[in-house]
Amino acid sequence: MIELLSEINYLHWLAFGLLLLIAELLGTGGYLLWMGISALIVGALMNFIPMSWQLQWMSFGALSLATTWLWWRRQLKSDQTGDASRKLNQKESQLVGQEITLDEDVVVGTNRVKLGDTTWSARSSVEITAGSRVKVVDVDGIILVIEPIEA
């Protein structure tokens, strides 16, 4: 077995990397992508730098862990910023920008307003009379922040 491992050259690593990338195309969800890229990097390094088989496998393992971790960090940051701007299945966020006519007077503080087919808790910083047009400018938890629309 040691003889077989010591016979591995850069072409074997390049072929192994390509096989891993081809296997990734079958739908493994990214698990083999970074290992395939790591194998290609080890093959490219071996083309220029002679390495023992132990160093080859250590390099492959370290590169696989490093590339996977770097991608995970990048993806985590992307997911967190994406979640903040996502409006799917968040009815409150979809209401920002809506304009309504008030059925009742609104006092400073928290009130109830009818929007669509339901009533919502709404907060206003000014008193607004019934019949006035207001706009939802923000959502604080499940409380809509409303402001009067200047005519």
Image (cartoon, rainbow, N blue to C red):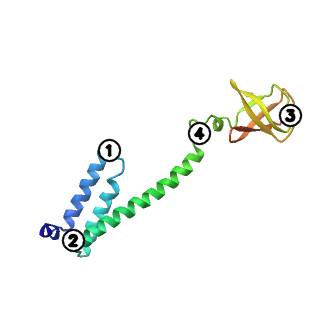
The residue positioned farthest toward the front in the image shown: 1
| Label 2 secondary element | helix
Measure the C-alpha gap from mark 4 to mark 2. 52 Å
Residue drawn where x is 21% and y is 67% of the image: 10
Q: In the rendered image of this protein, does residue 32 appear above or below residue 47?
A: above
**Which mark is first along the chain, 2 or 4?**
2
**Picture coordinates of residue 59 (x, y %)?**
30, 69
Residue 4 lies left or right of residue 15; in this view the side is left
Instruction: Give the residue number, with chain letter if any, for mark 1.
Output: 27
**Three-letter residue code for mark 2:** Trp
Res. 128 mark: 3
Mark earlier in primary sequence (3, 2): 2
Answer whether labels 3 and 1 touch (C-beta < 8 Å): no
Secondary structure under tag 3 reads loop
Please provide percent x and percent y for residue 7: 14, 69
The mark closer to the camera, 2 or 1, is 2
Q: Which mark is residue 87?
A: 4
Tell me how far mark 3 sits from mark 1, CA to CA.
57 Å
Identified by mark 1, the residue type is: Gly
* Quadrant (top left/top right/bottom left/bottom right) for the C terminus: top right
In the current view of this chain or complex, which residue is farthest to the bottom? Answer: 50
Residue 53's tag is 2
The answer to whether 74 appears left or right of 57 in the picture is right
Name the residue nearer the viewer: 13 or 55. Answer: 55
CA distance separating discs 3 and 2: 78 Å
Q: Earlier in the sequence, mark 4 or mark 3?
A: 4
Check disc 2: other Cα within 10 Å, few if <14, some if 14-19, many if 20+: some
Horizontally, residue 136 falls left or right of residue 91, namely right
In the image, residue 101 above or below residue 81: above
The kind of residue on which mark 4 rests is: Lys
Q: Secondary structure at mark 1?
A: loop
